[in-house]
Amino acid sequence: MTLFNFNFPPDLPLELAIDAVSDDSPTPASPARKQPAADPARAILEVLLMKLSKADLPGVEQLKEYLGHQYRRNFRPCTLRNTSISVTQFLRFLQAAGRSELSELRREDLEGFVEHEQDRGLKISSVYHRVGTVQPFIRHWINQGLIAEEVLKRPIRIKLPERLPRAMEPYDVKCLLAVLDGVRNRAMILVLLRTGMRIGELLDTRLSDVQLEEKKILIYEGEKNRRGRAVCVSPDAREALVAWIEKRNPHYDYLFYGWKGQRMSYNNARVRFKQYLNRAGLAHKGYSLHCLRHTFATELLNAGMHLECVQQLLGHSNLEMTLRYARLSDRSREEQYFKAMAMIEQEESDGLKQRDRQLPPLSEAPELLQPHS
């Protein structure tokens, strides 16, 4: 497969080579939007294939073919990278287990890989995602007749703890907003807080995607499910955006840009956010940029917005994902709970008083024992 040719040093680490072709930039999903000069997915695929060609592992040729299959299905650059990393780790495990060909794979190998990753000290969520990446690779080659079907006759399922989304406390939100300075940074954080956009979606936003008259921002491609949507912009976020747009360099494409108009990096945005948390005295709370999205959803549900509307604004593919916020923010449930508990406590208190009235009074002086006659 001939794609792009990059003159990287042969000993350049995979992560640095991938960073050099900017894997954060997604392939645009709409012809109405300005197309980039190069396809980042193709560039990263070329880097991955170059590195894998030097690897002496069982199944490495099948991995290269599988990456090409993912590319043709329009998978994101980060998905190609994660597939290469996870499956390469799996192939190294197979090699250590004495397998010389991918066709020799047995179910006990996959089960052993899960235990091996857990024994390495990885978080259960990391093991879950790694196995979730390896199993489709195996399924692909089962369908091609290379691997025995018994390997995935019963897919391995790893149960994850169900964590609630982490939203900021209302008082903490006020403290954060009070310390925001700088036209760009204020606009960036307010837009995240008022639209529920993922940070990657905001960093991918072009100036042409912002429709101030309609009070909305167009997301041409969702960061996770690759589905486009439109988000609404609140009055305070719109005001901050107007101030930033008036000041920004009009020749740059990205709404929030970094050096020489390039896409602002996630690390740049994260550092700015951490600085404001420090100023607000919230550094110890463990808040992240993604907490702004959780806060957005929680505040809307607390204000009475229907769950289906919140789902659309967040870009969730199913309602179950949005229900996590309902478990976190159901004020009506809390109000009913405290109302019921007040009634229970009142009934218990009234019951004690009623029982006290029914009991005979205790004599103040102890009754003397009568002597035996």
Image: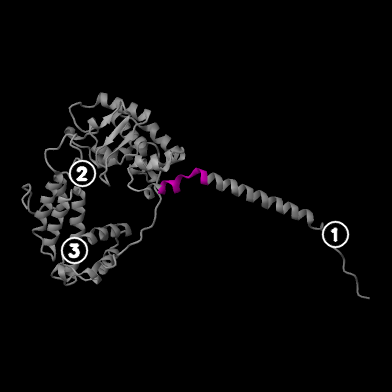
Image quarter where the C terminus lies is bottom right
Q: Work out whether residue 301 can be spotted.
A: yes
Q: Which residue is mark 1?
A: 365
Q: To which residue does mark 3 refer?
A: 143
Magenta stretch, residue numbers: 323-333
Q: Can residue 59 be found in the magenta stretch?
A: no
Nearer to us in this view, 244 or 371: 244
Report the amino acid beneath label 3: Asn
Q: Which residue appears at 29% of the width and 41% of the height? A: 199
Residue 163, x across and y down, in percent? 39, 53
Picture coordinates of residue 26 (x, y %)? 20, 43
Q: Which mark is residue 24?
A: 2
Residue 109: in sight, yes or no? no
Q: What number is the disc on residue 104?
A: none
Look at 12% across and 47% down and name the residue there.
42
Q: Where's residue 371, x and y in %?
A: 91, 72
